[in-house]
Image (tube, grey):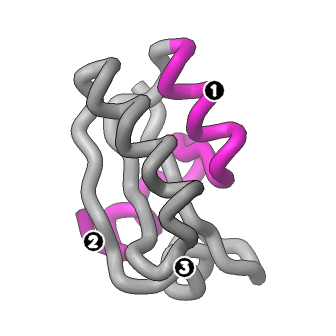
Amino acid sequence: MSYEKVAEVNAEKIIGTKQVLKAIKNGQAKEVIIANDADLHITSKISLAASEHNIPYSYVDSRKKLGKACGIDVSAATVAIKQ
């Protein structure tokens, strides 16, 4: 998953670890993007939940770039693309 794809989906994404985890558990996420430079204790919860719910996930390099691709002024550790 590239930053460009995240930027293209506009309103169809969920930003933030708590919201992404909730979306995974509620069946609202079809794909998850995780920043490699985020804390491991955060990203491991997300990748584990995605695996348990058979939701594909991928990694990008930077939280800052992921946040920018989402159109926010702060970094984002995780983003989910809605169903």
Mark 2 vs 1, N-terminal side: 2
- Quarter of the C terminus within the rendering: top left
Circle 1 residue = 22
The amino acid beneath tag 2 is Ser
How many numbered tags mark residues here? 3
Q: CA distance from mark 2 to mark 1?
A: 23 Å
- Look at 27% across and 71% down and name the residue there: 2
> From what the image shows, is residue 36 above or below residue 11?
below
Mark 3 vs 1, N-terminal side: 1
Picture coordinates of residue 54, whole percent (x, y): 24, 23
- Look at 55% across and 13% down and name the residue there: 26
Picture coordinates of residue 6, whole percent (x, y): 41, 62
The answer to whether the residue labelled 3 contacts the one labelled 1, judged by CB atoms less than 8 Å apart, is no
Q: Which is the main secondary structure of the residues drawn in magenta?
A: helix
Mark 3 vs 2, N-terminal side: 2
Label 3: how many Cα within 10 Å (few below 14, some 14–19, many 20+): some
Label 2: how many Cα within 10 Å (few below 14, some 14–19, many 20+): few
Q: Is residue 43 left or right of residue 5?
A: right
Q: Nearer the viewer, mark 2 or mark 1?
A: 1
Per the image, is 20 magenta? yes
Q: Secondary structure at mark 1?
A: helix
Q: Secondary structure at mark 3?
A: helix
Label 1: how many Cα within 10 Å (few below 14, some 14–19, many 20+): some
What's drawn in magenta, residue-wise?
1-26
In the rendering, which numbered label is found on residue 2?
A: 2
Circle 3 residue = 63
Q: CA distance from mark 3 to mark 2?
A: 13 Å
Picture coordinates of residue 19, whole percent (x, y): 68, 38
Which of the pair 77/10 is nearer the observer? Answer: 77
- Look at 76% across and 82% down and name the residue there: 73
